Amino acid sequence: MKILYVGDDWVGSNARSLANGFRQAGHDVVVVDSTSVSLPTRLSPPWIYAKATHRRAPWSIEAVHTRIDAIAAEFRPDMVFGFKAVFLDQRRLLGVPAQFHVHYSPDDTSNTYNTSPGYLELENEWDLVVTTKRHNVPELLERGARAVKFVLSAYDPAWHHLSARRDSRQYVVGFIGACRPDRRDRMISLARKYGRTMLVRGPGWCRVPELKVTRADVAGPVYGEHFASEIASVTANLVLLNSDNRDTHTCRTFEVPASGGLFVGERTGEHAELLEEGTECLLFSNENELDEILEWCVMSPGQAEKIAESGFRRIVEGRHRYVDRAREIVDEIS
């Protein structure tokens, strides 16, 4: 198929990984980067406009659509694929001549933060809506979506693989992900306990004063291959879910074990289905369980490494790459 792919195209983004997955599956893919609309550069005029009006800058939207229209006229795609393209002009996207128009959402589509009035108005005109949240399927159908496909999240072998460490330090516990209100207290508590043997990476953590006064190694986000090298420096890699998305699994569910890290995550049905507890991952339901797991990792690093190795094999042998998800989506519309 010839796929005109609209999504954020920065290095390490899930949108770029899925676009490459379609290419690896044998399709002809042209990407139009929508980052200028969805994630405008901090303090840039589009960013200031968005903060002031709670809408995306119309000139940024127009620039993206001008490029989409120009490419479509020459490329003549079979499919227009929008990766969380909710802030673009839905009528113009759906009006691009193509046999199929498919929208993909990596987040909870019932959370207003992940939609827009314009998208919701025309959601039922997309030929297929793809979601990574199982609970969204009946909700989307009830909203009037023509067809809905659930797919699991995935990992990208280009970034998530066994990697050498870039530092001699080995951390007992680590977390790579954004600072969120439902994660702050847990991170602060662990940082006070594990100090310099704890690693935290992600947007927002450097602005948490309670973390800065601990000895934990706290820094900004890591993307691409830097993710895997950080994972290699940590014995117990936390996989924390986003309560606003009602997550029961997340991208880290696949990215951590695919990078060789020991998966220490919240106990959910999907996690239990994907990895066997005790032999391929370690799961917890409360703080006491998490504390016990981390103490065990301190006392039994060799056994922890064996569980990480088993989790790595389970994920990399289980068809959980973005190319596998691309094939699922194409099979659905075919």
Image (cartoon, rainbow, N blue to C red):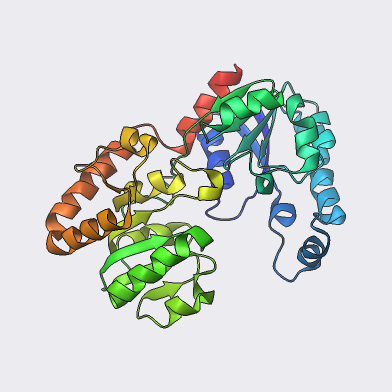
Place of residue 319 in the rendered image (x, y in percent of width and height, measured from the top left): 38, 32
Residue 46 left/right relative to 326? right
- Tell me the quarter of the image containing the C terminus: top right
Q: How many marks?
A: 0
Residue pictured at 52% horizontal, 37% vertical: 21
Residue pictured at 50% horizontal, 34% vertical: 24
For residue 125, which quarter of the picture? top right
Residue pictured at 30% horizontal, 64% vertical: 173
Residue pictured at 61% horizontal, 19% vertical: 333
* Residue occupying the far bottom of the picture: 213
For residue 126, which quarter of the picture? top right
Place of residue 146 in the rendered image (x, y in percent of width and height, measured from the top left): 69, 20
Work out whether residue 282 or residue 86 is closer to the camera in this orientation and state it: 282
Work out whether residue 4 or residue 286 is closer to the camera in this orientation and state it: 286
Residue 70 left/right relative to 33? right
* Residue occupying the far top of the picture: 334
Residue 27: tell me if it is visible: no
- Tell me the quarter of the image containing the N terminus: top right
Place of residue 159 in the rendered image (x, y in percent of width and height, measured from the top left): 43, 52
Residue 285: tell me if it is visible: yes
| Above-or-below relation of 169 to 6 | below
Place of residue 18 in the rendered image (x, y in percent of width and height, measured from the top left): 54, 40
Residue 264 left/right relative to 64? left
